[in-house]
């Protein structure tokens, strides 16, 4: 399979089920629940909610850069929130009609892991609030 590159130059070639299972072996039960079963961690409990250092938030499974720390803002919702993704094609949007409401789920474009949801109630300039589970992310501090 030929490599698929993102607009930011990262490999977006889909990861097959075998490789995905192999990558998940060292993950905690909570992280696996969020990524693979579309789980949600309780509000105000995620380890990255108060992360304020300079760096990049990457996918907990495949390490694709998802959000820059400069796009993070305090939404008051209890989950890490961002104005915009690292690159638009690093996030996939899926219509989510679960739990008696219609929302837009966001997934990692490379490994298809559940990340959270995006809502149209964020700050300018995008007006979007990407609401993420800390368990779906890993923070890589700028060097």
Image (cartoon, grey):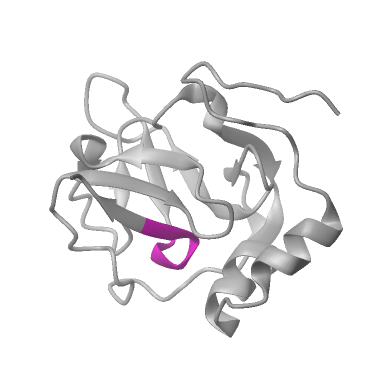
Q: Nearer the viewer, residue 95 or 80?
A: 80
Q: Nearer the viewer, residue 13 or 74?
A: 13
Residue at image point 80% right, 23% down: 2
Residue 103 magenta: no
Residue at image point 61% right, 63% down: 35
Residue at image point 33% right, 35% down: 121
Q: Is residue 31 left or right of residue 140?
A: right
Residue 135 magenta: yes
Q: Which residues are drawn in magenta?
A: 133-138
**x and y percent of residue 134 in the render?**
39, 64
Q: Is residue 115 left or right of residue 133?
A: right
Q: Is residue 127 left or right of residue 101?
A: left
The relative height of residue 90 versus residue 104 in the rendered view (above or below) is above
Q: Residue furthest left?
A: 53
The relative height of residue 136 versus residue 130 in the rendered view (above or below) is below
Q: Nearer the viewer, residue 14 or 143?
A: 143
Which part of the image, by quadrant, shows the N terminus?
Answer: top right
Q: Nearer the viewer, residue 95 or 81?
A: 81
**x and y percent of residue 79 in the render?**
33, 60
**x and y percent of residue 137 in the render?**
43, 58
Which part of the image, by quadrant, shows the C terminus?
Answer: top left
**x and y percent of residue 85 in the render?**
40, 32
Q: Residue furthest bottom?
A: 29
Residue at image point 46% right, 73% down: 41
Q: Quadrant of residue 106?
A: top right
């Amino acid at each position: 399979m030929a490599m698929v590159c993102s607009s930011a130059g990262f490999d977006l070639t889909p990861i097959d089920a075998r490789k995905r299972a192999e990558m998940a072996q060292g993950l905690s039960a909570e992280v696996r629940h969020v990524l693979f079963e579309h789980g949600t961690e309780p509000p105000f409990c995620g380890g990255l909610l108060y992360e304020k250092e300079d760096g990049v938030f990457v996918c907990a499974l495949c390490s694709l850069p998802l959000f820059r720390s400069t796009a993070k803002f305090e939404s008051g919702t209890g989950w890490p929130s961002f104005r915009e993704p690292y690159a638009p094609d690093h996030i996939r949007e899926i219509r989510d009609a679960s739990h008696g409401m219609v929302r837009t789920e966001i997934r990692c474009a490379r490994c298809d892991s559940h990340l959270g949801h995006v809502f149209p109630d964020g700050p300018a300039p995008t007006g979007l609030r990407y609401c993420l589970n800390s368990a779906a992310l890993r923070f890589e501090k700028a060097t």
